[in-house]
Image: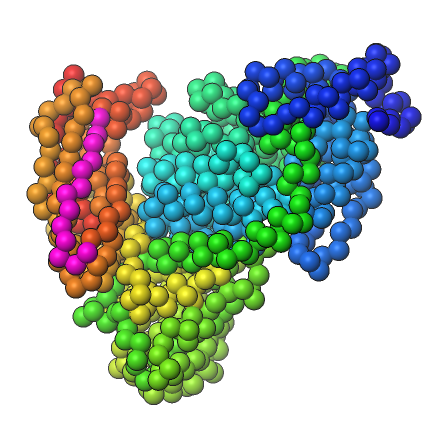
Amino acid sequence: MLIIKINILEKSQMKNILVKLVLISLSISGFYQTFSQTIPEEQISIRVDSVISLMTLEEKIGQLNQLSYGSGWGPTVKVQISSEYEEMIKLGEVGSFLNASGAELTHELQKMAVNESRMKIPLIFGLDVIHGFRTTFPVPIAEASTWEPNLVEKSASYQALEASSAGIHWTFSPMVDVARDPRWGRIVEGSGEDTYLGSLLSFARVKGYQGDLSNDNIISCAKHFAAYGGAEGGRDYNTVDISERTFRDIYLPPFKSAVDAGAETFMASFNEIGGIPSSGNKFLLTDILRKEWGFKGFVVSDWNSIGEMINHGFAENLKDAGRISINAGLDMDMESRAFTNHLFELVKENKVSEEVINESVRRILRIKFLLGLFDDPFKYCSKERETKNVMSEEVQNTALEVAKRSIVLLKNEESLLPLKKDLKKIAVIGPLADSKKDPLGAWSAFGNANDVVTVVEGLKKYVSNKTEILYSKGCEIEGESTDDFDDAIKIANESEVVILCLGERSDMTGEASNRSTLDIPGVQQKLVEEIYKTGKPIVVVLMNGRPLSIGWIDQNIPAIIEAWFLGIKSGDALAQVLFGDYNPSGKLPVTFPRTVGQVPIYYNHKNTGRPGNKRNHFTSQYLDLPLTPLYPFGYGLSYTKFDYSDLKLSNTKISDNEKLNISVKIKNTGDFDGEEVVQLFIRDLVASVTRPVKELKRFEKIFLKKDEEKVVNFVLSEEDLRFTGVDMKPVSEAGSFRVFVGTNSRDAIESEFELVK
Ligand code: BGC
């Protein structure tokens, strides 16, 4: 039975309210109850339109409003609904909450929306599930180091399972921003510097989260649209000014890939591009996203990004900002209240047409139907599912699987690693060795430090009972104190090997956490130099959210592991790698500069007219630095060795509709079974616009037993050779292409072919 309060009736100011009342009371329960996500789009669209025809303008605007609930989550958190929000829900003034989590709280809020608002439209609950809800998985840049789209998809699907069991319908993920500047703190949230790898992982994550949109899934949100990672100086929120060609060739493809995977929402970025802030960028939100790519979902702003257009100098006031945004194609306002406060007036003043608003409401209601929320608004808020799925063994096992496969071995001189499990004493030193909090990384949602297995704890689980693990913190991550150095040196001296865990605090990357240097913070560098003086074999384990410049460590320390932030299973994953239970297989998804002065440095740069050459002064180089990075994109070692040979091309020439088969033989010539990521790059030697010196086009991760060899096959076609041409349209051109196949973007064997037209 529908109950409408008198004051709402007055507010609605609708002339035909009586007619609609009858309509609603006759049909509402009927049409709301017959839906499920299996209903075809046309039918959803008919139903969406019938709902819209019953809505007041205020109610429509309410659907475009997203507010942050700001609650906690967990058994100890008491459900307390704020009276302001309660009133707004009942008046139909809010379409979505972010940060409201937990079966109980979301159930309460949903109950209010569907029982007490006039239109009974369910709310949609969003949250930043970036690398896990409660079970914290490795940070996205770590996951990218696996080079395993299938595994990344599996990880996203388990994250979705947990989140969806706690009332969440929607994650603000994947972040698919290409990042070429490690000073930028949000590099930790993405897949690194490469467009192709980033596009595959974007696709995988969207698929993983969304699955078939059952209640084990959540909808995804490709963000931040667009080129947010191109911020000048690596400073978050800063100006982006890149050419349309670079924008289309480098920054946009991972977003297009998200659309191809079926991403249901997009988030507009904070930044401007070429003078236009994304939240008011019609070219971006309408022309590219909807017209070129056929995106059907809705676009949410970033937090107050509509309001921030005032600071950009692009809107006079909030009302003006609201007008610009909605007309540009932005559908949902996260937290600026520009839409709720001003759209009604803007429509009355004919500055925004009601049809534009209807279109945005249509997109939002479509997704509420798709999720089955009209059918069963409470399908995501079941205490039973929450208890069963959150931190289940299955989810935790997957987190461990991803963690160990995310680890990148950077150096292993004289096969120091893997370590023997029956050493007498192992010294574990460093501010990250026993940190419970930092392995959670930035954006860990409801990750709990108590769940983290630290390196010290992990090692203890894996060594023999004859082995003693000695621990000393040595120093803090930041700060000047060297007071604990003596203790660290003492245990190093007593031990056969030292594991030195260095790096950054978890909050040194993530939103707004930019750094002007890539050095290891505090006195950690001094610590490693002191421990080095003991003459003991040292393994440095790095935990960080960005590439660090570790030149001294690379020169002096025999073994180095890049662990990023691995989530709750950190210690287990690292112990498995350190002792060889798992042979590391990760590869860097981003270049490691020698020092911050080389930034931006990325493998797919242009050649220039004067390519750097140390023997020729008048070339593109620094006087005081080598030309090369410390570790190139795609780099990562294994405990075994892989030999590449027999690079064969099926043809020396292909035409537009022919395929080129490329095969290469890989042999495991080392002493362990292991995995290798075989990488294929091309270079377009001459074109009507200059092309990068290398572009990743294919890769495959293979497993080879000791002494085993395998032929890996890749297929390329004309489509893979396209770029944005002079007229800004995709084009491929006749001419020669070089192919490189190898173990990273630097070390590869080569061949050549021609595209004929
Ligand atoms: C971030 C987004 C995030 C949003 C909601 C913003 O500050 O830029 O990535 O999804 O907050 O938490």
Residue 48 location, quadrant: top right
Q: Find residue 743 and report its horizontal and vertical position in percent.
A: 20, 49
Task: Classify 268 as above or below 511.
Answer: above
Q: Please give the range of residues in magenta.
A: 705-717
Q: Find residue 700 and report its horizontal and vertical position in percent.
A: 25, 43
Mark yes or no: residue 417 visible: yes
Quadrant for the N terminus in the image: top right
Horizontally, residue 219 falls left or right of residue 198, namely right
Task: Classify 449 as above or below 398.
Answer: below
Magenta includes 712?
yes
Mark yes or no: residue 336 visible: no
Question: Which is nearer the eye, 351 or 53?
Answer: 53
Magenta includes 306?
no
**Residue under the point 18% across and 70% down:** 414
Horizontally, residue 548 falls left or right of residue 259, namely left
**Residue under the point 33% across and 47% down:** 147
Horizontally, residue 421 falls left or right of residue 134, namely left
Q: Find residue 416 and report its horizontal and vertical position in percent.
A: 23, 72
Residue 619 location, quadrant: top left
**Residue under the point 57% across and 16% down:** 42
**Residue under the point 64% across and 44% down:** 167
Horizontally, residue 16 falls left or right of residue 478, namely right
Question: Which is nearer the eye, 278 or 491?
Answer: 491
Task: Classify 63 as above or below 570.
Answer: above
Question: Which is nearer the eye, 480 or 574?
Answer: 574
How was the colour assigned to the protein in this rendering? rainbow
Residue 657 location, quadrant: top left
